[in-house]
Image (cartoon, grey):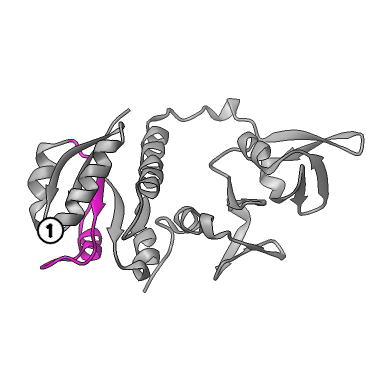
Amino acid sequence: MKLNCIIIDDEPMARKLLQEYIEEIDFLELAGTAENPLKVGKLLSENTVDLIFLDINMPRINGMDFLRSSVNLPMVIMTTAYGQYALDGFELSVVDYLVKPFSLERFLKASQKALELKTLRQKPAALPSTAVDHFFVKADGIIEKICYRDLLYAEGMANYVVLYTAQSKHIVYLTIKALLEQLPIKNFMQVHKSSIVNVDHVKAVEGNMLHVADRKLSIGPNYQSRVMEVLLNGKLLKR
């Protein structure tokens, strides 16, 4: 699967670097570049565009204003020197937010998010009748059924994980990575190297802490942008 992309940035060197990065990644195909959002209409009308790499600080109209005033845009990854607009970007449903200067590795990670999102959107929806809503764990010699909706969060301890529900907790011989692979991706996400949360049970975000049930769980630095993207994407109401 390929992603056709365009670059919108007023700096020639920034456009050149992005173009070089795109050429290094086999699933990205550059459809064109523009110096500012006012010149992007022709590119969007003449090409099937999946992804825009968008700068913020540009003459005449900045990237944020372009996002707010546009409808039916392709996926967007912000590429900017201004980190303070990250929350605004995620409120506007951007896929990722790259603060200049960023490495090829970080650029690849952001692009892979966009590819995964496109793949997910193209997957046919599973029939409700075949949906699995539970799993079993063996703890203290007993095999117990746990419904996904009842699992609040999980915390890892070496080769064990502790599964917390509203009524009980279960210590299971399993790693956090192995557990995450078995949980439905639409309901659960890793928020720290040693913790997974059920998105439906997150009550609030306070700095780098998540309120889940009666507990506060830390958000790891490497997970901050993804957590904010999932929790706030298109769901934050503003005056």
Residue at 12% of width from left, 51% of height from top? 34
Look at the picture and state if 4 lies above or below 70: above
Look at the picture and state if 75 lies above or below 130: below
- Answer with left or right where residue 96 lies relative to residue 61: right
Q: Which residue is mark 1?
A: 36
Q: Nearer the viewer, residue 195 or 203?
A: 195
Residue at 19% of width from left, 65% of height from top? 62
Q: Secondary structure at mark 1?
A: loop
Measured as percent of width and height from the top left, residue 50 is found at: 26, 39
- Answer with left or right where residue 61 lies relative to residue 163: left
Which residue lies most toward the right here?
141
Q: Does the rendering let one see residue 8?
A: no
The magenta region covers 48-71
Q: Residues within 10 Å of mark 1 (few under 14, many from 20)?
A: many
Q: Nearer the viewer, residue 57 or 69?
A: 57
Look at the picture and state if 91 lies above or below 143: below
- Residue 69 within the magenta-colored segment of the rendering: yes
Q: Quadrant of the C terminus?
A: bottom left
Measured as percent of width and height from the top left, residue 74 is found at: 26, 45
Q: Say what amino acid the circle numbered 1 marks.
A: Asn
- Answer with left or right where residue 38 lies relative to residue 192: left
Measured as percent of width and height from the top left, residue 167 is found at: 81, 53
Q: Nearer the viewer, residue 178 or 150?
A: 178
Q: Quadrant of the N terminus?
A: top left
Look at the picture and state if 239 lies above or below 189: below
Measured as percent of width and height from the top left, residue 200 is found at: 59, 52
